[in-house]
Amino acid sequence: MPMAKTNPAIASGTRRTYTVQELTKYGFRANDTYVNYSKNISEADKGRIIPGLTFDAEVYVAASGKEYIEKIVSTVDVVGNLAVSPSGNKTENPRAATKPVPAKSDTMSKEEWSEKDKRIGRAGAIQVAVQVIADFDGAVALADKMLKYIWTTNVNQNA
């Protein structure tokens, strides 16, 4: 039985650094390249990948040159001065600049809650409309009708 040939161009376990520009259906775009999720990546790692995030990952590179992310090795936190491994261990990152973190209030005003409720309602209406109607223009019209009903009635008002 002949043995399968191995392709030296395939590099499994290669470590790369990415800065996410946008999310896509099957992965993300980073460094002006599209990167797909490997079937081995955990859902937790997928959930950590957001636009603007810079992280190091183990990557499988196919013979075609397409990159598939296997797992996240470390990320740069939102402050920008620490590299955080998936286990939670923090190490100094000399490449990142330190930035002051502005103080934020833990409470939201009534106006902020109202705006948040509207955003959630809008997203929910659009999601339902797209699921119900396959035609995009029809889904937009249905979502507009749903939102008009929600915002013109006292359904969400406390009596």
Image (cartoon, rainbow, N blue to C red):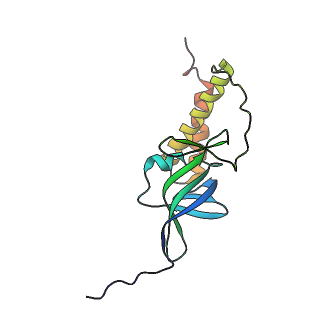
Question: Could you tell me which residue is drawn at 61 percent across and 58 percent down?
Answer: 17
Question: Could you tell me which residue is drawn at 71 percent across and 32 percent down?
Answer: 101
Between 62 and 117, the one lying in front of the other is 62
**Numbered label tally:** 0
Placement of 75 over or under 37, stated as above or below: above
Q: Residue furthest top?
A: 159
| Residue 135, quarter of the rendered image | bottom right
The image quadrant where one finds the C terminus is top right
Q: Position of residue 122 (x, y in %)?
A: 60, 36
Q: Position of residue 137 (x, y in %)?
A: 60, 51
Placement of 109 over or under 125, stated as above or below: above
Q: Position of residue 151 (x, y in %)?
A: 62, 27
For residue 46, side relative to residue 105 (left or right): left
Q: Residue furthest left?
A: 1
The image quadrant where one finds the N terminus is bottom left
Placement of 84 over or under 6, stated as above or below: above
For residue 13, side relative to residue 139 (left or right): left
Question: Could you tell me which residue is drawn at 74 percent across and 33 percent down?
Answer: 100
Between 14 and 126, the one lying in front of the other is 14
Placement of 53 over or under 150, stated as above or below: below
Question: Could you tell me which residue is drawn at 67 percent across and 42 percent down?
Answer: 81
Q: Position of residue 34 (x, y in %)?
A: 59, 64
